[in-house]
Structure formats: C-alpha cells, structure tokens
Image (spheres, coloured by chain):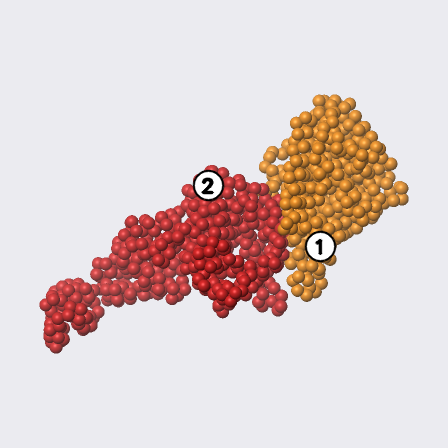
Amino acid sequence: MHNKSVAELSRELESGKISSVELTQQFLDRLKQEDGKYNSFITITEEQALADAKAADEKRAAGKASAWTGVPFAHKDIFCTNGVRTTCGSKMLENFVPPYDATVTEKFRQAGAVCLGKTNMDEFAMGSSNESSYFGAVTNPWGLSTGQKRVPGGSSGGSAAAVAARLVPAATATDTGGSIRQPAALCGVTGLKPTYGRVSRYGMIAFASSLDQGGTMARTAEDNALMLNVMAGFDPKDSTSIDRAVPDYTATLNEPLKGLKIGLPKEYFSDQLSPAMEEQVLNAVKEYEKLGATVKEVSLPNAKLAIAAYYVIAPAEASANLSRFDGVRYGYRCEDPKDLMDMYTRTRAEGFGAEVKRRILVGTYALSHGYYDAYYLKAQKVRRLIQQDFANAFKEVDVLMSPTSPSPAFVQGEKTNDPVTMYLEDIFTIAINLAGLPAMSVPAGFVDGLPVGLQIIGDHFAEARLLNAAHQFQQVTDWHQREPE
Amino acid sequence: MQWDIVIGLEIHVQLATRTKIFSGSSTAYGAEPNTQANAVDLAMPGTLPVPNENAFRYAVMFGLAVNAEIGRRSMFERKNYFYPDLPKGYQTTQLEQPIVGPGYVDVDLANGETKRIRIHHAHLEEDAGKSLHEDYHGMSGIDLNRAGTPLIEVVTEPDMNSAEEAVAFARKLHSLVTSLGICDGDMSQGSMRFDVNISLKPKGSDQLGTRTETKNLNSFRFMEQAIAHEVERQMDILEDGGRIVQETRLYNGDRDESRSMRTKEEANDYRYFPCPDLLPVVIDDDFIEDARSRLPELPDARKARFKEQYGLNDYDAGLLSGDAKLAAFFEEAAEHGKDAKLAANWIQGEFSARLKAEEKSVAESPITGAQLGDLVVRIADNTVSSAGAKKVFEALWTGENDNVDAIIDAKGLKQVSDTGALEAMVDEVLAGMPDQVAQYQNEEDPKKRKKMLGGFMGPLMKASKGQGNPKLFNEILVKKLGG
C-alpha cells in the first residue's frame, strides 16, 4: 500500500478493499518503524489519526466520501493544527499547542483526510538543508548506500523525505524562496508552489509574508492536483489571498501538450550548473519536444539580482514577523528573568537557532534608519524588475523550464558553516517567489544516483497548465516512480 | 525677553467601531482583562490582520469633516518596537500614505475671533494593550482588550500660540468626532488622548525653537496645565541662557510636574516598512460619497442654525452646539418648551451646574430635554415662579416624580396670578407698613426707590404663601405706591 499514490489509495478505499482505519494503521506502523532513519517527523499523532480514520470510514459508509476521505498524509509543522503542537522547527515553539487550525489544515480536515503528524523543517522555514531544525537534521532517503547521510533540502525537507521514503503519499509544504521545489528535487518527488495568494496563509507561521506560499508535495503530478483542489481558494481571513475561482486541477491533466511553448532562461543554464545536471534537464526538455512542445531560449536579465534582493526583503519581513516570539504570551520563556530586558534578550537568544538569529539581524539592519533606502527600497525596485522580466518572457512562451537546484543532494554538514553557499542552493527558485509565480519541481533523472529536479515555471494562476505539463511528462517517464533503496 | 509660544498637537481618537481594526473582537470598554482578545489580537503564530471597513469609513468621515483631502491609496506600515502590551512587536500604522491628507478646522476663541488650525494629516492605526503595574507582586499584568482598537491619529501643524488656543482646538475636535459619532469622546476611558509639541521662539522670529513633546494628556484641564507648565519650564531655561533638549516628557497632572521620558538620542529606530500582510486599500468615489452621505450636521453648521432657528446669540449658540448630546438635549427642550432662549438659559444654568456637581455627562442626566421643556413652558406662562421652578427641577432630577404639572400641583407651586386677589394682598401688606410706604414716597432717587420696592416683596410672598406671581406683585406695588 505504501507505494500507492493518493489517487490509487482513494480508489482502494472507494472499492472497499481496505478501510481507512486499516490503511492508517499500516502507514502509522511503517512510519514508526522507518522514520528513525530519516527523522522526517517532529510529531506523530497516532491517536488522532486513528480517530479521524474511523470518522472517515463512517463518512464513506454514509456515502459522503470525497477523493481525500480516509487518505493518510502529513502537514509540514508550520501549519497550525488545533490541539496538536506546532513547532515550526523551533525550540521557541517546542510546546506550543495552537487553539485554532490554519485554513489549509481546516480544509484537509473538512475533506476527511487523515493527518498522521507534523513533518520536520528548517527552523521557521529558514534553510535549504533541513539542518537548522531544533528537532534535528532530516536525512535524505536517497544516497544512504554510499555510507554518507545527505540533506533532503529545505525548508520542507521533512515533507519531501517522508514522501520519498513512502511514509506518506503526500504532505503539505511551504515555499518562500524554494522551500518546496528544492527539497522535492533533492528527494526525487513532485512539488508545487502555487501563485502567491492562491492558498491562504492564515495559520501558516510567517517567515516572509510577501513571499510565503503554501503548496503541495507528493510523488505524482496528479496527487499534487488533488492536494491543490483542497488547498486553493480565497480566504476572508487572509487579506492577501485572491478571490478567484478555483478550477478542478485534475480535469486538465490529460490535455495534449502539442504546441506548448517552452522557454529556457539562458541565465539558468550558466556555469553554476554542472554539465551532468544540465544534461538531465535538457533530456527532460527533449521529452517535451517529443510530446509536441516547442522550445526557445529566453532571457531574464535581472535574474542574477534575485538572491541579493531576496536576502534583504525576506529577512526584513522576518525580523518583524518574529518579534512576536518575546516570551510574553506563549512559547519559550527563559528561566527566572531578572527584568523585562533580560526576559526579552535571553528568551530570544535561547529560543532561536543561529540561522534565525542571523536573518533577524540582517533584516533589522536592512530596515534601520539610514539604510532603508539603500537596502529595502532598492531590493523592492529589483523585485519589480524581476517581475517585469518574467512578464516579458510570458509574452513569448507558455512555461519556463530550468533545473530546480544547481546540484543534487549534498552531504550533511557540508555547507552549514558557509551561509552564502547555502543561500545559492536557491539560485534558480528565488526569483519565482519575488515574482509571485507558480512553479513545480518534477523528478527528471539522476546524477550519481541522486535525483535531479526539473523546474517548470508558469504565469500567474497557471497551476493547471503546470500540473498538466508535469502529468504528461510522468506518463512517458518513470523518474517519479523510482524508490530509494 | 518676549517669547512666542508655538504649539502643535497629536491627538489619538479611538474610533467607535463595534469590532477591532484587524480582528473581530469587541472593542467594548471595561470587560474582564483579556476576554476581548482573540488569536489575532494575541498575535498567535500564523494569524493575519483583516481590515475593518467601518474604521476606514469613520476615518473618511473625519477627513470630510475637517475639509481634508482623502488618501485614495492608503497603505499600512509596521512600526517596530518591543513592549509587553504590543503583542506583535510592531504597531500597524500608516506613514507614507495616510488616509486623511491636509485639512483644517476653524476654532472660535474667547476673544470672539476665529482661528484656522491646519491639520497636517490623520492616519489609521491600532491601539496597544495596557500594562498594569499594581497588585502583581513585582510583576506586571498585561490586558490586551484594548489591543487592536482602531485609532485615528490627528496631527496638526504648529498653528496654536497659547494654551487657550490649544484647548479651544482640542474641544472643537472633541465636538467634531462626537458629532460625527465616530468616537464616544469619553476622555476618562482614554477615548481621546493628546500629545502636545511645544517650542518657544523670540517674539516675531520666524525661526522655530527646539520642541518637546508632552505625551498622553487625557483631559482638557491637564492639557492646559501641562502647556502652562512646559512653557514656563522652557522659558526659565532660555532666559537663563540654556538650551532646550528635544525630548519626550511625561506630565503628572496631580502634582503639576513633568519629567523626561526619553531624549531624541534615546529614541527608538522604529524601522518602518510597508506591512506585507495588508494590501494597499483603494478608496474610490463611491466610498467617499457614501461616507459623505453619512455625515450628520457638524458643529459649525449647527451653531449657525441655532442662531437662525432659535434666535440664540453667538455665545449661547456656540456653547450649545459644540457637544452633540447637549445640542440634542437643547433642541428637545426648545421644541417642548417653545421659548428657546429660556430653555438655553436653564440648560446653561441649573442643568449644567447640576451635571458638573455630580460629574455626570449629558447622556447620564436623569432628566430629559422634554421634561425641561415642559418646565420652561410653565415658567413662561407664569404658572411657576423661578424659585418654584427650581423646586420642580429638583424633583425631576431626584426622580421624585417625572411629570412637571404633577409636581407643581403636589408641591403647591402654582403661582397666584389673579390680579384681584393679588391687589387685596398688596393693600393689606401696605396697610401694615405705613412707615415704609411714607419713606418710599418721599424718596426722589429712582434707583433707591427701586431697591426699596424689594422690601415689600418679602411680606407679600409670605402673605401669598410663596404663590403670588412676583412680576404681578411688582406691577401692582408700583401702581399703588404711585410710581
């Protein structure tokens, strides 16, 4: 059962071959047995999952089931879950139990899906390797046979590793600068970051509000479509969510790709990319040509500025977003504070990890009096230039394709002491967040036995087209079906 | 040396919306601590602000009332600082694109002149919670009921030159926002709070001096005292050859003392930046026209109407039109009482004195405008004397009875206006006071004669058991005594 997709499990449940309680128990047993190797979960909610499974079986018996009723999955531990602790990978929230659901959590609950627990992540979603989690690094299921533990990417490394290791068929994730696509690429699974505003951010713990977007992770494009069907939509609780009709994302999966115009941004095929990676990506593009697509080179002239702009804007927003973690109302508070200042400084010094503190410092600096114009304002101008680059490109082509990451999964510890090298992990993904565009990472080959991701970028609200393109690719390739040893 | 005083005000006005500016919690005052603070107000992780349309509507109504440009594209910024009663670690406020642009208010001064005070801008923002430092054994209590209450912060140009002008402006603003119904105006509950910027410059100089800001004054009286105090403090420093330090000061009204809170060098770097959780709000023509259609009669227009419709003089019209509730009370009394001038006198006299003595607002008055109007009718038609009317007023106020005529009957306050009966009483009294009658008739000076007339009134009122109409008694006396 653990190798089946959401769509397949849904059909198994519908046929009555297995109950949700049985299925959930099987997944829970496997999860408890296997996750010691990966550390992909922070919290497993066995009791709640079995209760939800029972309720789902009853719903199905009453003829009220939908595609998700009784299907197991997991939430990234950034989505608030009513009554279940939500840590965001931080000591600061080690014991935080929200009294409310995120809108995404609520929607999966209403769909009858069975959440098995909360997946590991970089602390406050800040990281590209899942090594900044207070709950320990996550190990990529791929490449273990070499005797070295590799990173799963980040920040949604727990979700990616759990899906790759077949612990769950699908998991929610979030993407601020590549946090869905890069781990999906490094773990050989399929991930989608929707258009900014497509999925409600309510109850999704904020890192950088103008960039954060909840999204999907599963092995197949079809399962991503099924997830997005649940998650997408306007939410009156999130003023930045967009009031626009949500299509059935599974309905257009089988549209032929004949005539699809693909653009290859030349800046994304530079010397930062190893020839072996480039070859895999170009092979994938050839598959698309076989499916009837046309390919041309395009240019995103300001793409090279994306990392610099991002590392001003994201930390600036984060520095304010994380001010609420002050030890006053909830979360970690230092022992025996002498006075208010002592409580603030020690709570935050002890409660946040090094990467989070680094970004708060960077962001605070960038917003400081006398520096604002040179950093924040300049970065916002660059952001508009980057948006314009993409708008120009989409006048010529339907989708853009590129590698998702510059290299496959690297060995744990390799980049932890060099934040700038770590930041370059997102060199192909970050501009998409700055432009608010949807993008996917789709398994597209292997280099040295490690998965390679193909990034497909669409215009605003082109999720259906991206899912269609990914799904058609997955009909003629089997990269997404490969299983780690 | 002669000095010019230069004053600018920043006024926080709590908007009377039912719910908070970015959450659905109630804004009602006085609830148990933290019972009106939901996940958004507590800044729980992942929660997001959703703007309250009514707060924007009220702000636009204010803008229209002060003749201001309305900001068509209104943005929110985050103002970052740490304080335990500021749950998010930043205040959501407006800096670059406030909802209300430049405007002005015309203020009547005591000397009869009218002065125009310019509004620099007014912006929307959220209030913080309250820190309570008493009764917690060395710890502090935090009450977040107020956190997220919508405010408009009104910032004036430095157009006021005395405490009197500043207070007159503050009163006018109070009158405006209460008339608009966008603020309850209850200063004791912090519904309006004033920060005063003060500087001095040599008389006639066009160079502004260094200013100080005195924060959080919550009554007109404290504001007046604080200005006087600060002007004197600055003057002492300047005349001793010293320099004013730009700083924020706190004024203690009970002790008439102020102390420095922080200097410019110690000021926070608030690191303002646009709030990414809130999109820019576009105010369109329809929204503005809708707000305009909701504008009630404003104090200036009301004052003009009171003069026109009720024949009040400028002074009376000004006093009665400023406060919306007092104005409504007056109109009710004037409609019922027929004699508007008499109603106005009673409201400014007995009624206002009684409210003040019992520290009550107009809304808390135990008597209605209609009741006072009924009383005015009975004074005007000579049913009761003014002394009797005071007794009726007292009975109404204490709730002894709610009907004016019933009180007059029950207390026997009806005046005797039957001329025949009154003449008989006058004859009888004059017969008993021959010496005084002679003295009166021998007096040449009309002023003294008039005074002497009063000597007969006491016995007459006594003879009539207090029910004789004094005015008629007077007329009869003059006639009988021979002018």
Chain identifier for the red-coloured part of the image: B
Classed neighbour count for the residue bearing mark 2: other residues with Cα under 10 Å, few (<14), some (14–19), many (≥20) = some
What is the secondary structure assignment of the residue under circle 1? helix
What is the secondary structure assignment of the residue under circle 2? helix
Q: Return the chain for callout 2.
A: B
Chain identifier for the orange-coloured part of the image: A
Image quadrant occupied by the N terminus of chain B: bottom left
Residue furthest toward the bottom?
Answer: B435
Callout 2, which amino acid? Answer: Ile
Q: Return the chain for callout 1.
A: A
- Residue for point 15% across, 70% down: B445
Q: Looking at this view, is A181 or A236 the one in front?
A: A181
Counting from the top left corner in percent of width and height, residue B65 is at 43, 47
**Left or right: B448, with A349 as reference point:** left
Which of the 4 image quadrants contains residue B430? Answer: bottom left
| Residue A92: mark | 1
- Residue for point 79% across, 31% down: A281
Classify B61 as above or below A233: below
Counting from the top left corner in percent of width and height, residue B11 is at 49, 54
Classify B266 as above or below A389: below
- Residue for point 43% across, 48% down: B104
Which of the 4 image quadrants contains residue B427? Answer: bottom left
Classed neighbour count for the residue bearing mark 1: other residues with Cα under 10 Å, few (<14), some (14–19), many (≥20) = many
Callout 1, which amino acid? Answer: Met
Q: Can the viewer see residue B165?
A: yes
The residue that label 2 is drawn on is B288
